[in-house]
Amino acid sequence: MDMLATETTDDWGPFGRPLFNDDDARNLSRVGVVDVGSNSVRLVIFDGAARSPAYFYNEKILCGLGEGLDETGRLNPRGRQRALDAIRRFQTLADGLNLAPLTAVATAAVREASDGPEFCAEVLHSTGLRLHVIDGTEEARLAAQGVLLGWPWADGLVCDIGGSSMELAVLTDGKVGQRGTAPLGPLRLNRISGGKKGLRAHIEKEITLLRDKIEASPRPLYLVGGSWRAIARLDMYRRNYPLKVLHEYHMTAAELRKTLKWIETADLDTIRPETGISADRLALVPIAAQVLAGVLRVLKPREINISSFGLREGLLYEQMPPRLRNRDPLIEACQFAEAKDARVPGFGKELYRFIRPLYSRAPVARLRLIRAACLLHDVSWRTHPDYRPDVCFDYATRANLGGLNHQGRVFLGLALLHRYKNSRSSDRFDPLLSLIAPDDIVQAEILGKAMRFGAMFTAQNGDSLGGLRWHSQQKKLVLSIGPKAMALYGEVAQARFLSLAKALGAETDVVALRRSRP
């Protein structure tokens, strides 16, 4: 079932009340994960709302453990020492933060190397940390679960590339199905014979075997892994794409093919400083690009999405009870932000109730963004007033939020900007506004002005506030205001009400509600 298809009126929709303040959920509020991959070793400490965690700490070392593995059958000696040093550092950091025991997994290089068990024993002896070596299908499952952390309703193919292997998993109705692995990591493709044609044939053969094994059909593709993210950054650079957030970055197969062709001849070292890609990562991009070209040829995806969430987030998802997995990551994150940073936590729900009559015909997907905006409407209040609109816009468009595509980010950011300011005087927003339709720009401004007016009644609860009625056919906006709130309807509130009406192209009427009888 589409998780955005229904809405209830007595709570926050299909996901019920937020769980970040539930004791069981808060046990997940700070979780450390170590991922020992074939190319990188990383520590991530998750913090915040459990369903939509923030990254309290994130450190990566590109060790190259799997470099030369096919020739020697052993872990790269220099990479092994660097990985051990990194893990020692990570464990020391975790001890200093009084974390619960770290969860640590090792993937293709450690599981395939003859000295992999010896390396695991050395890590255990040196740090007390037990490395769990997982096979390729388990790696694929965890990567797919990471995608579900950001897209609870995901349906398609998850393709995760590491240094030594590439995994593929089927997602159907938010569930992980068949999965498999292939030796297609960039570190092990350098020595394929036959030149460019030989490499292409080898890649297509391996991907075809993988496709047939898991019975994959052409479906939306979710890309996971550092090499895919590097290619996405290059795609953004080539297209001069205005928003640099990788998560939920969307590409068509045709556009991505242009970028893969461009990578073949581009001077990547020259443009590296402008993309923020490390030199070690960039060195793997040309071969990774050929693998991705093979993925497009064999799997024929209808659309391609980048996921910043993968195996590490999948480990966190693994610990979540089903009731938590089914929450909306966007709403959960916004609930947490309001509870932590708003002047009056909880008013976001009253604000949503107040402006809801303006959106009686809005689809659930739009109502979801309106809910998020109401929850975030006051979280940037500490910012200097002169910069508050800009900071609100940047918060929405740049924050680490799951379940929010790029068009939704811009809509949300624009609405929050107009929560604090009637007009846009700066042209710095124009490139980002090009990502949404002209009507969405108008609707975001209306939402912002509705919140700007509704925020004048922060001190009132829903029973005494009153409400709005919107007669779309007659273009008439009616404000019914309760007796306890009438004193708040002063000059500034009146001006904001008229500004909202002007944005709607509406006439206005104000009705004073009588005092209720004792």
Image (spheres, rainbow, N blue to C red):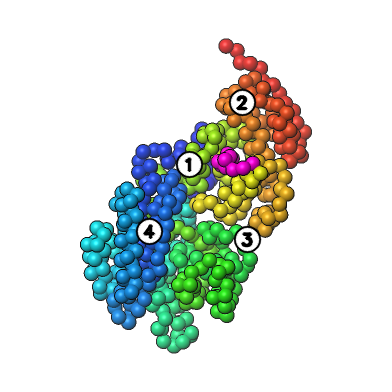
Secondary element at image label 2: helix
Would you say residue 52 sits in the magenta stretch? no
Q: Report how far apart the C-alphas of labels 3 and 2 lie in the structure.
A: 41 Å
Which one is closest to the eye, mark 4 or mark 3?
4
Left or right of residue 381: residue 477? right
Of 408 and 175, which appears nearest the observer?
408
Q: Which residues are magenta?
A: 376-385
Q: Specify the amino acid type for callout 1.
A: Phe
Q: Report how far apart the C-alphas of labels 1 and 4 lie in the structure.
A: 24 Å
Residue 469 seen in the figure? yes
Q: Specify the amino acid type for callout 4.
A: Leu
Would you say residue 383 sits in the magenta stretch? yes
Q: Which mark is residue 295?
A: none
Q: What percent of the width, then of the height, locates residue 268? A: 55, 75
Of 423 and 374, which appears nearest the observer?
423
Secondary element at image label 4: strand
Residue at mark 3: 242
Residue at mark 4: 43
Residue at mark 1: 336
Which one is closest to the eye, mark 3 or mark 2?
3
Image quadrant in which the C terminus is located: top right
Q: Is residue 517 above or below residue 189?
A: above
Q: Report how far apart the C-alphas of labels 4 and 2 lie in the structure.
A: 48 Å
Secondary element at image label 3: loop
Q: Residue furthest bottom?
A: 194
Q: Are marks 2 and 1 in contact (CB under 8 Å)?
A: no
Q: Specify the amino acid type for callout 3.
A: Pro
Q: Quadrant of residue 60?
A: bottom left
